[in-house]
């Protein structure tokens, strides 16, 4: 009895699908309810909330106009709730995995465990860590899933006997083949994968000689070749990208100006990226992430990774007990049978070709794979991860003994799941830091003047683009405005120079236009995970020892008058930022800083009494300063001197605070500078 007709085989496929789904869930879902918005997610969610769904088209018209249609369709269904986007991201990823698994089972129907192993390695591939950038990567994952499904349907059509069914499936495959490169242009390398898969499938079915088999494959591939040719014509000669990194004219200019250098770059970069994508991906990202895990995070990583390995081993044992092919049994190791060796060699060849041809368009376009956490260039690996799964399983099956094969595959799956879980933990902490920042700003500032330019230093993670700050700020302080009325910029040497000049510029980010008034800056600093947000008053400020030198250099430029201290406090929208956090030390610190802006020293003293009653205290002792001032200037010098003793233990920040206070040319109204200097800066 063949393996395909045994009773056990009837539900083996469903068991395999369940195993892959559970392993994927272990990798991506343990902390899903603690994830939020990151990087490009912010301007996309802001656009959906503040504008019409049709405006998504304008966001991508400069480089990938067909990506906007995805958001135009999806945003009205999901809205701004981060959890929904993360679940969609997971489902898109899982759909691509299952389509790939279907493809593998059509190519090698008797290789049960190897095909599951290859699909699972693709599912949890640790070289791609952008899964949690869920809103932005929706169009990436949609394009990827469409590409995989299109190839799978092409091969499925070759297996169909009925002509009508074959035509319908082929038409669907062609439609997907037309759309996916319109979304992500360098995924066009999948067309070489499609042709290779067609040729291999025909050779397995018909055993034709080389050239007749090639001619038959070309004939079947012809409709896809036409659609690819039309796409390339449109992309090269019709569509004009105004974004430099996707502009064909700029790219052609580089190749014609430096042809030898650019061709050499293609060869060298392709080889390097091939090595990074297939080998280094299993070592560099896991080390970068797991090495900085806390003990509790490491425990979760180990639990999820171990459970994923256990599920795969149980599946293997189930196969072995039933003698299903691809697992081996007590009588024979079917991995070493002639037909299995042929499948293994094919997996190696098809895997290597898939990695190569999916990397090549990306390299030609001037991009590269990089696993540095700051670069975020690992997102150029995901299209090649299919090939990585086939290649590694093939190499492991070809080169290693049976027991060692299983151990290596289990190790790779386990370390990959651990990496993805830790990536989720890192992103959960990132989101917690962002939520804390914006809730504290809402506690501190009732309103912010229109036209303000924010500089935000979130040292625990850092912002890479201005929209990561202006989008949440406008959600809080300008709900309903279709243009950002509060701008933001990242501090660099260039923006620091513009800040000193007080320049005014206009910025256009994906057709979102707003002014950058460097003469109206408000600087926000949260220098550490346990520090409170410091809305810096350029006239009267204190900085933490953890503050970056760049913040210290621009602190005097921060204009606290951009904070309007009158009116009701704004509430960050709970659908995005979650419920209001507990009123801990930072809540009272923000209220004290708000009262200091008013010059209400008695209110600060009352807040000081309240935190004393609640036994609250800061990690960063410079945060005692407003309470010291409140006590001192409301006539409670004894309490002020007690706080001075605590602050004096931080010698460097205290010295800077004293120098700043003594240099005040015109102290704020009702601010007795001499008294503060005497209490804080005296020797006693």
Image (cartoon, rainbow, N blue to C red):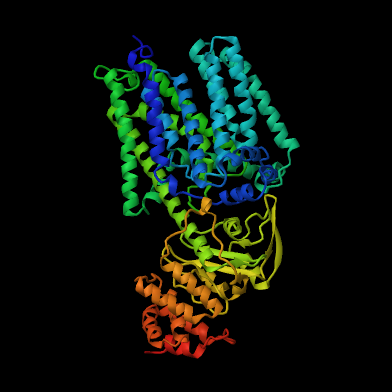
In the rendered image, the vertical position of residue 321 relative to residue 517, given as above or below: above
Q: Residue 191: image x %, image y %?
A: 59, 28
Horizontally, is 293 left or right of 595 in the view?
A: left
Q: Residue furthest right?
A: 238
Residue positioned 37% across, 79% down in the render: 646
Q: How many marks?
A: 0
Relative image position of residue 657 (x, y in whole percent): 48, 81
Give the vertical position of 462 relative to 367 (above or below).
below
Seen at 54% across and 54% down, the residue is 573
Q: Kindly give the residue lying farthest to the left in the view shown.
A: 330
Quarter holding residue 68: top right
Residue 383 visible in the snapshot: yes
Q: Nearer the viewer, residue 539 or 241?
A: 539
Decide if residue 247 is on the left or right side of residue 20.
right
Q: Is residue 401 something one can see in this rendering?
A: no
Location of residue 528 in the rendering, given as x and y in whole percent from the top left corner: 44, 65
Q: In the displayed structure, does residue 607 sit left or right of residue 246? A: left
- Which of the pair 108/524 is nearer the observer? 524
Q: Quadrant of the C terminus?
A: bottom left
Q: Nearer the viewer, residue 445 or 501?
A: 445
Q: Quadrant of the N terminus?
A: top left
Q: Nearer the viewer, residue 349 or 447?
A: 447
What residue sits 61% from the left and 51% below the top? 46
Q: Is residue 165 left or right of residue 542?
A: right
**Compared to 253, does 534 lie above or below?**
below
Q: Position of residue 415 (x, y in %)?
A: 36, 41
Vertical position of residue 451 compared to residue 44: above or below: below
């Amino acid at each position: 009895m063949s393996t395909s007709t045994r009773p056990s085989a009837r539900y083996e496929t469903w068991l395999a699908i369940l195993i892959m789904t559970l392993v994927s869930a272990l990798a991506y879902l343990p902390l899903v309810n603690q994830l939020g918005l990151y990087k490009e997610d912010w301007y996309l969610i802001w656009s959906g909330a503040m504008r019409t769904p049709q405006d998504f088209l304008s966001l991508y018209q400069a480089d990938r106009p067909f990506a906007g249609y995805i958001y135009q369709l999806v945003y009205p269904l999901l809205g701004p709730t981060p959890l929904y986007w993360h679940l969609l991201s997971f489902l898109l990823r899982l759909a691509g995995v299952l389509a790939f698994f279907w493809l593998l089972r059509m190519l090698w129907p008797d290789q049960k465990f190897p095909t599951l192993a290859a699909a699972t390695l693709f599912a949890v591939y640790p070289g791609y860590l952008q899964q949690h950038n869920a809103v932005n990567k929706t169009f990436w994952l949609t394009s990827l899933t469409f590409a995989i499904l299109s190839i799978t349907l092409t091969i499925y059509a070759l297996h169909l006997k009925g002509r009508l069914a074959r035509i319908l499936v082929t038409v669907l495959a062609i439609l997907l083949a037309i759309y996916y490169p319109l979304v992500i242009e360098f995924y066009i390398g999948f067309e070489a994968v499609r042709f290779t898969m067609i040729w291999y499938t025909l050779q397995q079915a018909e055993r034709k000689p080389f050239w007749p088999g090639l001619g038959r494959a070309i004939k079947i591939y012809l409709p896809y070749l036409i659609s690819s040719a039309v796409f390339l014509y449109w992309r090269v000669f019709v569509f004009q990208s105004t974004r430099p990194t996707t502009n064909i004219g700029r790219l052609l200019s580089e190749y014609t100006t430096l042809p030898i250098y650019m061709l050499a770059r293609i060869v060298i970069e392709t080889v390097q990226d091939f090595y990074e994508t297939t080998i280094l991906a299993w070592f560099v990202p896991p080390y970068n992430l797991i090495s900085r895990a806390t003990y509790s995070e490491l425990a979760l990583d180990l639990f999820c990774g171990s459970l994923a390995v256990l599920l795969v081993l149980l599946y293997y044992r189930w196969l072995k007990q039933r003698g299903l092919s691809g697992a081996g049994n007590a009588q024979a190791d079917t991995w070493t049978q002639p037909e299995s060796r042929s499948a293994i060699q094919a997996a190696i060849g098809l895997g290597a070709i898939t990695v190569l041809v999916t990397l090549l368009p990306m390299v030609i376009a001037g991009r590269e794979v990089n696993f540095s956490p700051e670069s975020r260039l690992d997102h150029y690996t995901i299209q090649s991860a299919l090939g990585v799964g086939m290649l590694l399983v093939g190499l492991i099956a070809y080169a290693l003994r049976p027991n060692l094969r299983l151990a290596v595959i289990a190790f790779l799956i386990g370390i990959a799941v651990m990496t993805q879980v830790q990536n989720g933990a890192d992103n959960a902490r990132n989101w917690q830091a962002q939520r804390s920042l914006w809730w504290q700003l809402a506690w501190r500032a009732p309103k912010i003047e229109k036209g303000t330019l924010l500089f935000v230093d979130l040292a625990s993670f850092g912002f890479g683009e201005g929209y990561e700050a202006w989008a949440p700020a406008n959600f809080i302080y300008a709900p309903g405005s279709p243009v950002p009325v509060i701008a933001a910029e990242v501090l660099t040497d260039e923006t620091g120079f513009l800040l000193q000049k007080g320049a005014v510029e206009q910025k256009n980010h994906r057709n979102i236009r707003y002014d950058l008034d460097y003469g109206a800056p408000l600087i926000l600093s949260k220098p550490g995970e346990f520090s409170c947000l410091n809305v810096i008053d350029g006239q009267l400020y204190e900085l933490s020892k953890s503050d970056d030198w760049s913040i210290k250099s621009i602190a005097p430029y921060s204009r606290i008058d951009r904070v309007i201290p009158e009116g009701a406090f704004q509430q960050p929208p709970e659908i995005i930022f979650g419920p209001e956090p507990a009123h801990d030390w930072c809540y009272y610190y923000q209220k004290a800083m708000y009262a200091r802006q008013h010059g209400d020293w008695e209110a600060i003293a009352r807040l000081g009494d309240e935190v004393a009653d609640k036994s609250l205290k800061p990690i960063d002792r410079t945060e005692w300063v407003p309470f010291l001032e409140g006590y001192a200037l409301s006539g409670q010098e004894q309490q002020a001197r007690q706080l001075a003793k605590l602050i004096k233990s931080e010698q460097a920040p205290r010295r800077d605070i004293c120098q700043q206070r003594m240099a005040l040319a015109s102290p704020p109204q009702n601010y007795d500078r001499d008294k503060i200097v005497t209490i804080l800066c005296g020797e006693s």
